[in-house]
Amino acid sequence: MPKADFITGLILIGLSLYVFVESWRMPRLEHLKIHPLSVPGLVPAFLASVILIFGTALVIRSILRGGHRLGFTFEGLRQIFNKPNNQRLLITAILSIVYAVLLIGHLPYWLATGLYIFLFIILFEWKQGMDRVSWRRYFVSGILIAIFSSLAITLVFERLFLVSLP
Amino acid sequence: MTGLIDNLARFFSAIVGFITPLALLHIGWATLLGIIIGALPGLTATMGIALITTLTYKLPADLAILVLICVYVGAIYGGSRTAILINIPGTPANAATTLDGFPLAMQGLAGRAMGVATSGSVLGSFIGILFLATIAPILGNYALKFQSFEFFWLSIFGIVISGHLTALEDPIKGWIAGFLGLLVAMVGQEGIHAYERFTYGTTELLGGFALIPAMVGAFGFSEVLSVMQNPPAKMAKAPKDSVFPKILDVLRYWRTIIRSGLIGTSIGIIPGVGEDIGAWVSYAAARRKSKEKEKFGKGSIEGLMAAETGNNAVVPGAIIPALTLAIPGSAPAAVLLAAMFIHGLRPGPLIMVESPQFVYQVVAMVFFATLAIFIYGVGLSRLLLKVLAIPRSRLMPIVFVLCAIGSYAITSRLFDIYVMIGFGIVGYILRRMRYPMAPLVLGIILGDILDKNLRRGLVLTDGDLTPFFTRPICLVLWVITLSSILLSITPVRHGLMEGFSWLRLKTYQLLKR
C-alpha cells in the first residue's frame, strides 16, 4: 500500500496544483462589479489547497514507510497479468468499455447488447477439455441468454419506460 | 399539542393514501427487488437505488420515491440472508451480521438466525421511523434559522466526520475521498454568477457531472469489476429450521434492540455515515454491555440482533437530514436525495413550510417497506436461494447493460454512459486502495452547498471570518471537525493523552494534600 499511496499522493499534488492554477486564471468579473470574495475561482482554489495538504501528507507518510522505492520491473508486471483474477478483471473491463463506448450508438442497441452478453458468457464459462455435448450446451445457452436478455431489456426500455434507445 | 395532533393526522392520511392497489403493487415488487439486490453479493443498496431511479423517473413523484425507499429498506435487509447463509455480506451494511449469523447457520440454526435478522431489521426500522416522524419536523423548523455560515460548516463537518468514520484505520483516505467529491461538484456552471468552471467548452458539462450516472458507475460498474475479479462465492444451502421470528428472542433482547435502534438512528443522522457503521457500532455496544460476551463471534443471537437492528435503523435516520437539510445521512440516502430533486421535490430547510405532508408521506413509505420486509422475511427463502445460484458470468453482464442504459435513460445522452464508465474505473481504483465511497458521494452532493454558502457568507461579512467561528452552531461544528482531525494525528493524540494523564495526576496529588 505505501507504493500506491506514494503514487496517489503525487497525483493528488499534481491535480491540486492544476486546479489551483486554473482557479487563479478564472475571471474576476470586475466588469460586473461583483464582490471580490464571490469570484468563481475562490472555492475550487480552497479545495485544491486542502487536497494539496492531504496529498503532501500522503507522500511524506509513504516515503517514511519506504513507498518511494517503487521497483517497477517487467517481470513484476508480467506476474500481475498472469494472475487469473487480474485476467478476469481485465477481460471484464475491456469487454464492458468496448460495449459502452464503441458498440452502443454505432450498432443497433439490441444487437450491441446481445453481442456483449454473449461474449461475456462465452469467455467466462469456457472450460478446458469440454466434450462435444457440453460444447453445444455451452454455446446454445450463451446464445439463448444473450438473445432473451437483450430483447427483454430493449423492449422494457423502449415500450415501458419510453426511452429512445441509442 | 395541536402540532402533535396535526402531525398524527398527516401521518395517518399519508398511510391511507398508500392503501391503493397500485401503491401496494409497487411496494410489493420494489421491496422484493430490493431484497434480491441486497442478497446478491456485489449489488448494493446504493447501486440498486441509483439503477431503479433511472427506471422509475417517469412514474409520478410519490410512487417513484415509494419504490426507491422500498428498494432501500429491502436491500439493507436482504443482505442479511447472504451473510447468514454463505458468510458473505450481501451489502456492506451486513458485514457485522456475518460474525454471528454464519456461525449460527453452521450450527444448523440458519432459520432461527434469519428470524432474528427479520425481527431485528423490522424493529430497528420502526425505532428509526419513530424518530423520523418526530425529529424531522423539529429539525426542519430549526434548520430555518441556519444561515450561510452554518451551511458552510455543515458541509465541511459532514465530509470530515463521514471521512473519519468510514475509514477509521486511515481517516486521511476518507477525507481525500470527500474533498475529491467536493472538487467533482465544482465542474459546471456555478450557482452565483453562472460562470462555467472546468467545462472547457463542452456543453455536456454545463450542468456538471450528473449524480445518477456517476453513482451508477462508482457503485455499479466498479462492483461488476470487483465481483468478476474475486473468486466465485460458495453455494448456499436451504435452512432446515423455521425462519419465523421468535417472540422469545425479541423479549429476551429488548434492551439490545432499543439500544441498537437508537445507535443506528443517530448514526444515520450523521451526514454520510451509513448502515455499515450503524451495524458495527451497535454490535460493539451490544458486546460491551452483554452478559454473554464469550458467545460473540461464535453464534450469539444478541450480536446478530444488534447488527441487524443497527443497520436497518440507519435507513430512517439517514433520511432525516436528507429531508430537512438536503444533506444525506448515508450513500443510498444521497442517491435518494438526488432522485427527489429529479422528481421536482425540494428537500431542505423549507420542507416543513412548503410541503410538510411530504415528510409524513416518506414516514409512511418507510413504514410500508418495513411491513413488506417482515412479510417477505417470513415467506421468502427458496426464491432467494434460487437467485443466489445464478452464476455471476450471467448476472454481471446484465447488471452492466442496465448500468449503461440506466445512465443513458434520464437525459438520453451517450455522454452519461461515458461518465458512468469514468466514475466506475476511478471508483474501482479508489476502492482497491481502501478509499471509502460514501464521503465521495457526500462531497458531490455538498459541493454546491459549500460553494454558494462560503462565498455568500464572505460577502455578507465583507470578508470578516468571525461569524464563521463564533455563531453557536458554527462553534460546535468547527470544534468537532477540528478535534476529529487533530485526534487522528498520532503524535497529537499521544500528546493530548499524556497531557490529560499529567493533569489527572496533579489533580490527584493536590486533592491528597
Image (cartoon, coloured by chain):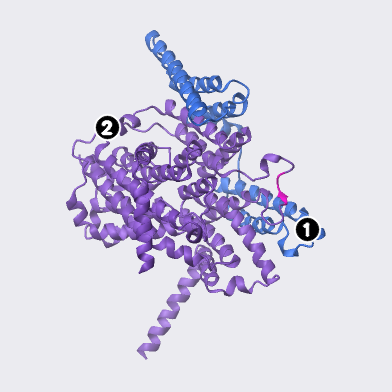
Q: Amino acid at mark 2?
A: Arg
Label at residue B305: none
Q: Does dot 1 land on a helix, a strand or a loop? A: loop
Residue A73 in the image: state x and y as whole percent. Answer: 61, 35
Q: In which quadrant of the rendered image does the C terminus of chain B lie?
A: bottom left
Residue bearing the label numbered 1: A28
Left or right placement of residue A92 versus residue A48 in this view: left
Q: Residue furthest bottom?
A: B513
Q: How many residues crowd mark 1 within 10 Å: few (<14), some (14–19), many (20+)? A: some
Q: Is residue B452 magenta?
A: no
Q: Is residue B149 above or below residue B415?
A: below
Identify which residue, B260 or B487, lies in the foreground: B260
Residue at the spot 65% in from the left edge and 51% down from the top edge: B186
Q: Which mark is residue B382?
A: 2
Q: Chain of mark 1?
A: A
Q: Which chain is blue?
A: A
Q: Chain B's shade in the image?
A: purple
Say which residue appears at 27% left-offset and 32% top-offset. B382
Indicate the position of residue A50 as horizontal and vertical percent values: 63, 58
Image spot of residue B419 (x, y percent):
60, 38
Query: Which residue is nearer to you in this view: A12 or B449?
Result: B449
Q: Residue furthest top?
A: A132
Chain assignment, label 2: B
Question: For residue B375, which quarter of the picture?
Answer: top left
In the image, are marks 2 and 1 on the same chain?
Answer: no
Say which quadrant the N terminus of chain B sits in: bottom left
Q: Which residues are magenta?
A: B195-199
Please determine whether, in this image, residue B7 is positioned above or below residue B223. Answer: below
